[in-house]
Image (cartoon, rainbow, N blue to C red):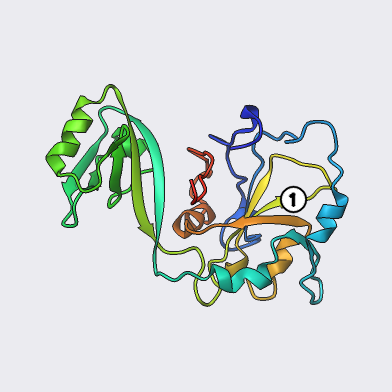
Amino acid sequence: AALDPSLRYKESTFETGSAYTNGGTYKWSHVCKGRGKNIFGKEKIEEVGTLQACKQNPGGMGAGAYYGIDVGTVLDEWLPDDDEVTQRLTVQLQKPLGLILEESDLGGCFIAELLEGGAAEKGGVLMAGDSIESANAFDCRGEELDEVLEVFADAGSTINLVVTREVPPGIRRDGSGLTLLTLPIGSPGCGQSRFDIVRVGDSPNAWGTRLLANSLVIGRMVSGQPCIDEMASGQGTPQIVNCGILASESG
């Protein structure tokens, strides 16, 4: 999502080439330029003082300053308590869906298989093993397979699914996997639709937070390591298939 509908990132692609692929000149980052527009319009926002207040100086030879979240002070807070985290995904599919569902021993249903060439496979969002949380706003959690299939059958030509997936946490105890969301700072007060995903924890030790120089750190990836690994594999051009605004835990 963005501040203006014209800046939404759906169907935007990430930069491709040797600099964004494992091996060679890999920069340990992935860049999405969005629509290539200035988020704030033509007028410059003067917040130089605020920017300086969140300036971080990691120290060390060749280490440039970065801004925003101080990675060093919050790293311990980010370490996960569990071996997995729950990822929630929303997708709209046209019938026929191309899905095979099975009933879970714990109640509810999950995707057992995606049929080749079906809408689900072509959508590129769903995976075998995903649990069905809701279908067209009907809560499928704990429901028997027949009940869920009836909801699918009664739906029109499209169906809105919410699924959950257990995935490894984005950061591990040794610090590897730490992946940050950053915005480049061209000059104080200027905004742009570009954002970077920076793999600080997987980069060589000599790099680390040096990769954040002249950037504003605004957050981290809680999960999604398999996705980032796929982006770095160089198999095609990474594209954003869906996006939206994350609701806070308080609702």
Residue 251 visible in rendering? yes
Most foreground residue, 133 or 114: 133
Q: Dividing the image into 4 quarters, which one contains the N terminus?
A: top right
Indicate left or right for 232 with 96 as reference: right
Above or below — where is 149 with respect to 207? above
Q: Which residue shows up at 87% across the image and 43% down it?
A: 46
Q: In this view, does 202 lie above or below 7?
A: below
Side of 112 where 207 appears, left or right: right
Residue sitting nearer the eye, 204 or 68: 68
Residue 90 lies, in percent from the top left, at 40, 40
Q: Can residue 124 be seen in this view?
A: no
Given the current orientation, which residue lies at the most extreme left position?
146
Q: What residue type is labelled 1?
A: Pro
Q: Residue at x 34, y 45 (%)?
A: 163
Q: Position of residue 131 (x, y in %)?
A: 28, 49
Q: Quick one: SS at disc 1?
A: strand
Pinpoint residue 42: horizontal percent, then vertical percent: 83, 31
2 shown above or below 54: above
Q: How many marks?
A: 1
Mark 1 highlights which residue? Answer: 184
Nearer to the camera, 44 or 120: 44
Q: Is residue 157 left or right of residue 149?
A: right
Residue plotted at (14% across, 44% down): 144
Q: Locate residue 148: give its quadrant.
A: top left
